[in-house]
Amino acid sequence: MNGIPVEKGPELDVAVSSRVRLARNFADIPFSAKMTPKHQAALVKRMQGIISEYSNYGKLMFADMTSMHPVDRVSLMERHLISPELAESKGNSGAFINENENVSIMVNEEDHIRIQAIFSGILLEKAYRICDEIDSIIAEKADYAFDNKYGYLTSCPTNIGSGMRASVMLHLPALVMSGFMKSILESCTKLGVAVRGIYGENSEAVGDMFQVSNQITLGRKDDETIAAIDAICKQIIDREKALRYQLYKQNIYIFEDRIFRSYGLLGNARVLSTQECFKLLSDVRLGVSMGIIKDINILALNEMLVLSQPATLQKIAGKQLNQEERDVKRAELIRMKIQKMENN
């Protein structure tokens, strides 16, 4: 698998994926800022013992960051299986990842462990149930750092409390094109909701993709947070869908021309940069979701989005590539994917 959720969740035409992440620390180990290599190694060994028999969602295999090539690390990050911070980790760290690549547990990141589940569409409740189940299994075998007043204690104060982040990746081309994205960002900020780029905090929004997540973890129950993010995302989705059809009706020919030009470029280009590829995929995804393009499905486009990223491209090629070589390889990969779907 390629870290691409394959289940067709609700609102898939706008909601690319849903993810829930739980940050936890153990009571008998110093927090990350004061951990020694010995502490890190002991934590990895402890987690291997706890996770070894767990296989409810497929066996969780350990990806060791200390022995992994930098390209492989970044590829895991591009597939949203680990965080950018873990990909850059210098110490003894890693991640337990299941075969379907929709469940992972990061070890020795900012916190001792971070449990996450990811699915296509809006499936926050399902993702949370899986994380909560794994969390309970770990809690049976180890004591978490927990305070009766503040809740789960974390390295970053913004995560204290529930330690949970619930996020949905939304594809919002109509909001971007119409200029309404700014007002959406302002409204979300007032509601205590963060809107970030494709890799979360400090990342850019590319291909009209935005990650919507909770900012508040203290004093709020998990189910309340899930319900709040779910409701806000559905409001944004409704606005996006309404704007898509408004823009379409304003000038059908210009709207379709943009989509089919992008489709034509993806199917024929010999050189594609990451930025251009993401933008073209955004246009084509819009066309597919509105029924304008018939030969491609949304999940296939989600796959192209992941596979066309720099490190994952090099992993597919089996060697390191310079920028020009990556741009050529990216165009070749996209052409082949499109041709295959058109011929089926």
Image (cartoon, helix red, strand yellow):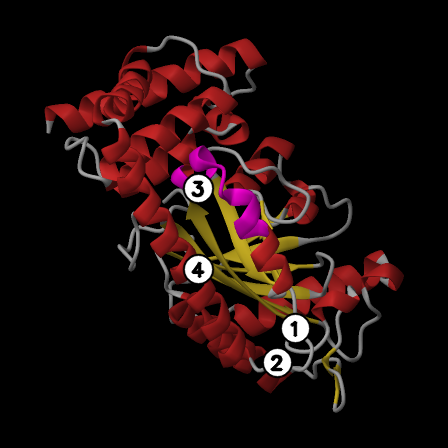
For marks 2 and 3, the one nearer the N-term is 3
Residue 20 is situated, as x and y percent measured from the top left of the image, at: 51, 64
* Mark nearer the viewer, 4 or 3: 3
* Mark nearer the viewer, 2 or 3: 3
Q: Quadrant of the C terminus?
A: top left
Q: Quadrant of the N terminus?
A: top left
For label 1, count other residues whose C-alpha is less than 10 Å away and answer few (under 14), some (14-19) or many (20+).
many
Q: Please name the residue that numbered disc 3 is placed on.
A: 175
Evaluate if marks 2 and 1 touch, with contact meaning CB atoms under 8 Å apart: yes
Instruction: Give the distance between the C-alpha atoms of the residues marked 2 and 1, in whole angstroms.
Output: 6 Å
Mark 4: secondary structure: helix
Q: Please name the residue that numbered disc 1 is placed on.
A: 217
Residue 47 is situated, as x and y percent measured from the top left of the image, at: 62, 68
The span shown in magenta is 174-185
For label 4, count other residues whose C-alpha is less than 10 Å away and answer few (under 14), some (14-19) or many (20+).
many
Q: Residue at x 55, y 38 (%)?
A: 205
Identified by mark 4, the residue type is: Cys
Residue situated in front as seen by the camera: 254 or 158: 254
Mark 1: secondary structure: loop
Q: Please name the residue that numbered disc 2 is placed on.
A: 220
Q: Residue at x 70, y 56 (%)?
A: 109
